[in-house]
Amino acid sequence: MTNIRVGLIGFGTIGTGVARNLLEQSALLQQRLGKSIQLLRICDRDISHDRGLDLRGVELTDNIDHVIKADDIDLVIELIGGYEPARSFVQTAIEHGKHVVTANKALIAKHGDELFVVAEKHGVSLAFEAAVGGGIACLKALREGLAGNEIQAVFGILNGTCNYILTRMENEGLDFDVVLKDAQDLGYAEADPSFDVDGVDTAHKLAILSAMAFGTKIAFDAVHTEGIRQISAQDIQSATELGYRIKLLGITRPHGDQVEMRVHPTLVPLDSQIAQVSDSYNAVLVDGDYVEKTIFIGRGAGEKPTASAVISDVMDIARAMPDGIKHLAPPMGFPQANRRPFNVLPIVDVECAYYLRLMVKDQPGVMASITNVLADHRISLEAITQKERHETEAVAVVMLVHETREGNLQAAIDRIMQFESVEDQPLILRIERFGE
Amino acid sequence: MTNIRVGLIGFGTIGTGVARNLLEQSALLQQRLGKSIQLLRICDRDISHDRGLDLRGVELTDNIDHVIKADDIDLVIELIGGYEPARSFVQTAIEHGKHVVTANKALIAKHGDELFVVAEKHGVSLAFEAAVGGGIACLKALREGLAGNEIQAVFGILNGTCNYILTRMENEGLDFDVVLKDAQDLGYAEADPSFDVDGVDTAHKLAILSAMAFGTKIAFDAVHTEGIRQISAQDIQSATELGYRIKLLGITRPHGDQVEMRVHPTLVPLDSQIAQVSDSYNAVLVDGDYVEKTIFIGRGAGEKPTASAVISDVMDIARAMPDGIKHLAPPMGFPQANRRPFNVLPIVDVECAYYLRLMVKDQPGVMASITNVLADHRISLEAITQKERHETEAVAVVMLVHETREGNLQAAIDRIMQFESVEDQPLILRIERFGE
């Protein structure tokens, strides 16, 4: 029986969850593995404060080299997050022959491809199940469980903070700023929430899912990314009346040699499974040519769900050590040599149905002018509603339009925005019906 | 690059799907694997009729030994189903050093444990992802993706035929017999539907899930199994009015050394994710101590979804061949030596909330008598409704009762059934709220 000797870097919330699992669940892990996993050393800048764990047998250090360069460590768990110094720590650990497990989506989305090459060269694994969908185990499902499929599309609710905010906005009829403030007070949102609410975190995860689904390189910079700040309680209400719910979705589909990758608030049908995923839950919908639609739902963040995913990677590697490592599925599901370059489908070439909200002065003929422009661009209206009448102030006009090329819609909107009676920035939301 | 040489036995619907994938998707499989999978030979009793596939390079045979004993076959895919001769074919293939992939839940539920021992002895894999949940990849998720969790419970909608029937009964207000007949005419239900509608198929799958979740031996015979024949359109209607939907669920939970395993029609809250799983879709909900609730939803049957799961097993084995096989996760998630004997929690010791439907003659005092008996047994009522009044004929009285031991409820019902004014067999359905 081989012991697997583990070093952990980053002893925050997730690190505490992982250490808790390795220490308190060790008998179960050993029963499953037939070998034991030993948490040997934990590195953090702050090793003084109490995490409420019985750490006998575990060495605490603030010297990173005692983990990533140590001779007695087989596997390093990186939980410090962010691009740097995580990237250089992970690379150093790999170069010292250590397997690495990380929950760091930013790192994988931005530097994953260069790190996979280094890991392959050194004959070690770099695993990252916790980077997408927290505890759901959706990466393993996509990479291995659905490996017989040509993937047609992947959709995801990938950020628990945004989903929590949108759920509360809908349930309580509150505006974005109010719910965000409350979420921050409750610790559900960061003091600087922009990674979450501006869609960056979702884009990191979508870039990983997309490359894994289609066998391309990871192209985070190619993700068209919009956040949820511009959504009002009124938009959520209007969407509901039209039979839709607003979710921040990551969407990726192949189009020949090109791939569509976009993150934005999306109208989804109220009766779709994705629409039922509320609060901080995440969901990943994979549409494969053989399996059809498969949906994975669970906690996308938090100490214990994230730890669950980290431990599953550790178990896979531990099971394969020492001589089975090269038979694990490659990190992105395709051998490095078989992964294609990424070619983005420009957002103007995406075809979608849309929800449009314009602020319009209620003057005779304005609706006719708008609908004439849409007709000029061969954009057909599915619904148009004006919520109220007001003599002097602008009122909201909400339209649903059938599928059209986004560039075409933008050209029409540009013309409409030149009308004197149309005010403000328009809100343009895409609709996704999951091929139904 | 090693070729993996595959032999297929059973060339029906699923076999056609698997052959189609191996033949038509071979470039993609090779891109993912870095090696090629070659479908060398197919065995079926009927090799004459056309399955609409281009079978150049594939040898058809009706001689089983040409697959399961052939020197040039590395991996056998068993898709003939049922206990025998599938069991002996699989055993022979294993004894001849072949890896085996099967979609046969009956075989694994009944003979899996003996076959795993033989496979271990011969150093080959016996894989069966397609046996539970069709294409969903839920076994891989439970066995590997959630391996860091002590599992608290597994719930499943595991039979697409039953879920289809219950969905149509609800949507169209039809009775069981009518929908079954129609499903048979449409080919969605077998001519002999008892494996499906009496819960046997679900019990096969639940026994596998339970053993994988809790590290026990597979104990199909210990599953308490009830089907859906006794459900009426009226029951579905009553359940809806009370805020529930009726699903055929498999449920398993550990209780110390004992495990609860039961399959029966179950009332689930209308707003639960499980309640949204309609038509022939399957769902598996795993509740782990770290991950919390995780739900996997997808097609549980059919040519292509089942083929998807079979291929994922083939890919795992192909990736590990020849020398990494022993590093694959053990088939049931625990090494054979670490799997405990199964001890059933008797159904009388299960604690549940219940839905009761009694046919009662509308006589003065009868409701009082019934509620007095329940009170005697310390069973508390959550709701009681009598749908209509009728002078002479019995009418349905529907009750919801709070959690109680099933043995206790049975004792109360036995007393109630002795009342002259209470007719017929009572309908007793269990309620599951998934720990909410």
Image (cartoon, coloured by chain):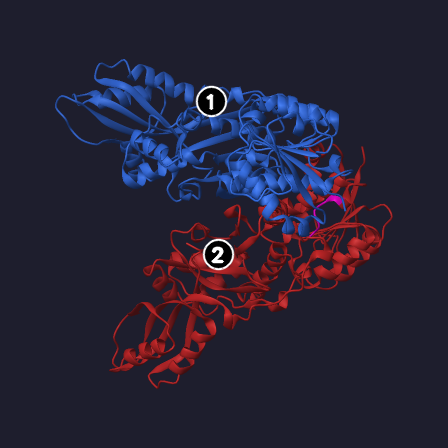
Chain colours: A red, B blue
Badge 1: chain ID: B
**Eyeballing the image, is B330 above or below A43?**
above
Q: Nearer the viewer, residue B410 or A366?
A: A366
Residue B228 rendering spot, x and y as whole percentages: 37, 28
Can I make out residue A54 in this image?
Answer: no
Q: Residue at x 24, y 15 (%)?
A: B419
Residue A59 rendering spot, x and y as whole percentages: 80, 46
Q: 10 Å neighbourhood of mark 1: few (<14), some, or many (≥20)?
A: many
Left or right placement of residue B162 versus residue B324 in this view? left
Q: Residue beneath label 2, please?
A: A164
Which secondary structure lies at badge 1? strand
A71 in the magenta segment: no
Q: Residue beneath label 1, please?
A: B224
Residue B435, label in figure: none
Which residues are drawn in magenta?
A327-331
Q: Which secondary structure class fits the magenta region best?
A: loop
Query: As shown in the figure, which amino acid type bears the numbered disc 1?
Result: His
A330 in the magenta segment: yes
Residue B90 rendering spot, x and y as whole percentages: 64, 26
Left or right placement of residue B308 versus residue A2 in this view? left
Which secondary structure lies at badge 2? helix
